Amino acid sequence: MRTSNHLIGVLNFLTFLLSVPILGGGIWLSSRANNTDCLKFLQWPLIIIGVSIMVVSLAGFAGACYRNTFLMRLYLVVMFVVIAVLIGFIIFAYVVTDKGSGRRVMNREYLEYNLEDYSGWLEERVASDSYWGKIGSCIRDSRVCAKMGRTINGVPETAEMFYVRHLTPIQSGCCKPPAECGYVYQNETVWNLGSGLMGTNADCTRWSNDQEQLCYACNSCKAGVLASLKKSWRKVSVINIVVMILLVIVYIVAYAAYRNNKRMDNDEPYGEARMTKSQPSAFHL
């Protein structure tokens, strides 16, 4: 029985350690929400799951050390629920970030993003006027566009240099007009009307050289936020899937150890059926 208690204690310590990457992923998303992605609600479920695993693991560890049956049962029940919620959250994250990707543009290294390529619950939430006001203000306050400026030996980069840069989705969607609009490059965030016809994209008329406006009201900016969020969530989801698999394995082993512990407390020999114990033979030697 002591061996089973030690095993359960070790397994609970392992689940405690596994909660750290989940909690870390939530904190990382939270930092991006404040500075880059500007979506401040999707990281909280992940943080709550990480904290829950950490607390439940400590309860299970205490139950194993002090042979507290209530704490062990609480650990098994709550951990089962937490694992189920984590699986559901991973599926949800993949579903809401499944659609949409950048488009290649001729003579450009960076991608451009179109809102019509995205759909679903997340796109509707981001594109809504009431919610986008907060996101646009967050992007403006982060000064992501102001930080795009580059100089080569004290000389501002030329259009040819800018066109071969690998821009982030938010830089591409929010800090410059779409290429189809025909604007002429002056610097990273100043583009003047060209001599040709302006494109039919509604974002062409939304663009402004006002550094407080730029393309923050453009659909391309909303698409850039969605693309940035998709990249962030896919990175975190890979960690979550690995941790979830390990959690399931640890849970199964912990449950088997708990059953073995319970059987030993009931003085049941390994492999003996409960029916045999409940109806003992009439003769005892």
Image (tube, rainbow, N blue to C red):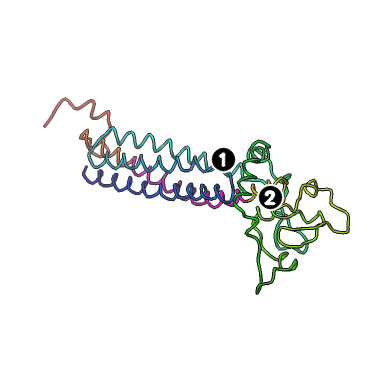
Q: Which residue is mark 2?
A: 212
Q: Amino acid at mark 2?
A: Glu
Which residue is pictured at 30% across the width and 48% down the height?
10
- Residue nearest the observer in this picture, 191 or 25: 191
Q: Position of residue 184 (x, y in %)?
A: 80, 60
Residue 206 locus on image (x, y percent)? 77, 47
Quarter of the picture holding the N terminus: top left
Q: Is residue 11 left or right of residue 138?
A: left
Does the magenta-highlighted stretch encompass residue 249?
yes
Q: Which mark is residue 92?
A: 1
Q: Quadrant of residue 136?
A: top right
Q: Are marks 2 and 1 in contact (CB under 8 Å)?
A: no
Q: Earlier in the sequence, mark 2 or mark 1?
A: 1
**Residues shaded magenta:** 228-255
**In the image shown, does 209 or 73 lie closer to the viewer?**
209
Distance (Cα) linking label 2 and label 1: 35 Å
- For residue 140: magenta? no
In front of the other: 166 or 3? 166
